[in-house]
Image: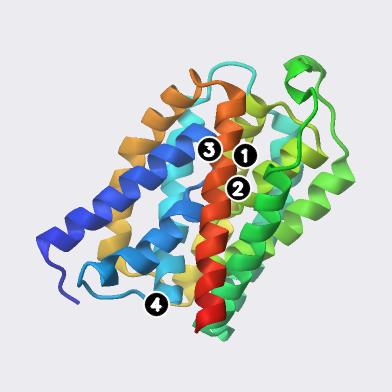
Amino acid sequence: MEYSIIFLVLLFVIGFIGSFVSGMVGIGGSIIKYPMLLYIPPALGFIAFSAHEVSGISAVQVFFATIGGVFAYRKGDYLNKQLIIYMGTSILIGSFIGGYGSRFMTDSSVNLVYGILAVLAAVMMFIPKKEIDSIPLEKVTFNKWVATVSALFVGIGAGVVGAAGAFILVPIMLLILKIPTRMTIATSLAITFISSIGSTTGKLLTGQVLLVPALIMIVASLIASPLGVKVGKKVNVKLLQGILAVLILATAIKIWLDIILV
């Protein structure tokens, strides 16, 4: 398939915006890029991607966006290694199952899974998180069973839509596991990277990835994600939580309107 220069520039802009925000708030960016890729190109008169194609492009992009984010957070005490091991292993298994199994689902089913995940994440983001940021980073503890099981289910759902699951993983870490905001942001990027290995592999094996759009998104991710991390380190944690909550809510509303109106 041939793509015009203007269309490729549009894809780069979408990838840049999504990756910048993902680095800033600790998500892979699919919560933003999924609806942007699905709705913006046809709205501007370009070709429309199917839900399967968007999820495939998103899966590859998230893999590289999170690499950039984790690299930028490599210094300091923000990366919780135990949490990365427990949740990362579990979400990797789940995301491969979801990514591979999505080949048997219709486009509307993929959108439905995405809508359900977005609503759950939005609800959790708007529930007050009391005093989690007063906990010293070296004294952070968590329930290993809750972390493992929740990551498995997040991975399955996220693998279906080509996401890495951070948009719902972050609310779980903040609200249920009581992880401080900045540690959540850094650690979720590492877990998201692991998750994206499974979902990307599943999408590639089932031929759901369009090469050229995916390459454009990769370049945008590697440039924008570290820039987002730099900004995120300087922004108030409450503002970061608010930005993510609004993004998730807006996406959930848009997805469900489309599901209901179709």
Amino acid at dot 1: Ser
Q: Which mark is residue 188?
A: 1
Q: Secondary structure at mark 4?
A: loop
- Residue found at x 84% / y 27%: 141
Residue at mark 4:
50
Image coordinates for residue 239, horizontal then vertical, percent: 56, 28
Q: Which residue is mark 2?
A: 166
Which quadrant holds the N terminus?
bottom left
Residue depicted at x 60% and y 52%? 195
Amino acid tagged 4: Ser
The answer to whether the residues at label 1 and label 2 have Cβ atoms under 8 Å apart is yes
The residues bearing labels 4 and 1 have C-alpha atoms spaced at a distance of: 28 Å
Secondary element under disc 2, as helix, strand or loop, is helix
Q: Is residue 44 left or right of residue 30?
A: left
In the image, is 158 to the left or to the right of 56? right
Observer able to see residue 26: no
- Distance, label 3 to label 4, CA atoms, is 28 Å
Location of residue 97 with respect to 152 vertically, above or below: below
Camera-near label (3 vs 2) is: 3
Q: CA distance from mark 3 to mark 2?
A: 14 Å
